[in-house]
Amino acid sequence: MYVAAEIRIMGKTTKVKWLKEPQKHDYPAAEKYLSLTLEPSAAKKVTGRLKLAEMSEYAAKDIFRASGLPMLGVSNSHVEKDRSLIILNEKLSPLLLYRDGIASKLVIADGYHRLCAVYTFDEDSMIPCKIV
């Protein structure tokens, strides 16, 4: 199990807990998202590569910087749901990331809301992910 960082919530220290691998439903979600900017066949190939990729870890703040995306606030219902899972000590699914060499940016194919939720507690948290 990956453990990102200890965080303090209402005076108590808790750990962000991670599953060892992304969940099966994360891959079709990533493929669907990637198909918005890639041809469907290319999105399918990237997703296949993600399934075979080894697990890695990167700091939350570095993933944000590489992606160029803004952080969603706690008012976002999906971020709030993932924050609640962290508080309840539930395991989160690792992120699926794609290096877009043409646009020179990192695409968060799946896990944007989880990343935002963790970042609200600790921007230095190490986030487990698969990246291709």
Image (spheres, rainbow, N blue to C red):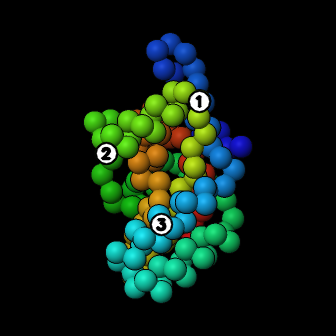
Few, some or many C-alpha atoms within 10 Å of disc 1 (few <14, some 14-19, many ≥20)? some
* 89 vs 2: above or below: above
At numbered mark 3, what does the secondary structure look like: helix, strand or loop?
helix
Whole-Å distance between the Cαs marked 3 and 1? 25 Å
Whole-Å distance between the Cαs marked 1 and 2? 21 Å
Few, some or many C-alpha atoms within 10 Å of disc 3 (few <14, some 14-19, many ≥20)? many
Image label count:
3
Residue at position x 60%, y 55% in the image: 23
* 64 vs 54: above or below: above
Which numbered disc flags the more N-terminal residue, 3 or 2?
Answer: 3
Residue at position x 38%, y 36% in the image: 80
At numbered mark 1, what does the secondary structure look like: helix, strand or loop?
loop
Q: Which mark is residue 30?
A: 3
Which numbered disc flags the more N-terminal residue, 1 or 2?
Answer: 2
Q: Which mark is residue 89?
A: 1
Which numbered disc flags the more N-terminal residue, 3 or 1?
Answer: 3
Residue at position x 37%, y 43% in the image: 78
**Quick check: can you spot residue 106?**
no
Q: Name the residue carrying label 2.
A: 72
Q: Nearer the viewer, residue 129 or 23?
A: 23
* 120 vs 53: above or below: above
Residue at position x 30%, y 41% in the image: 76
**Quick check: can you spot residue 127?**
yes
Few, some or many C-alpha atoms within 10 Å of disc 2 (few <14, some 14-19, many ≥20)? some
Q: Nearer the viewer, residue 79 or 103?
A: 79
Q: Viewer-nearest of labels 3 and 2?
A: 3
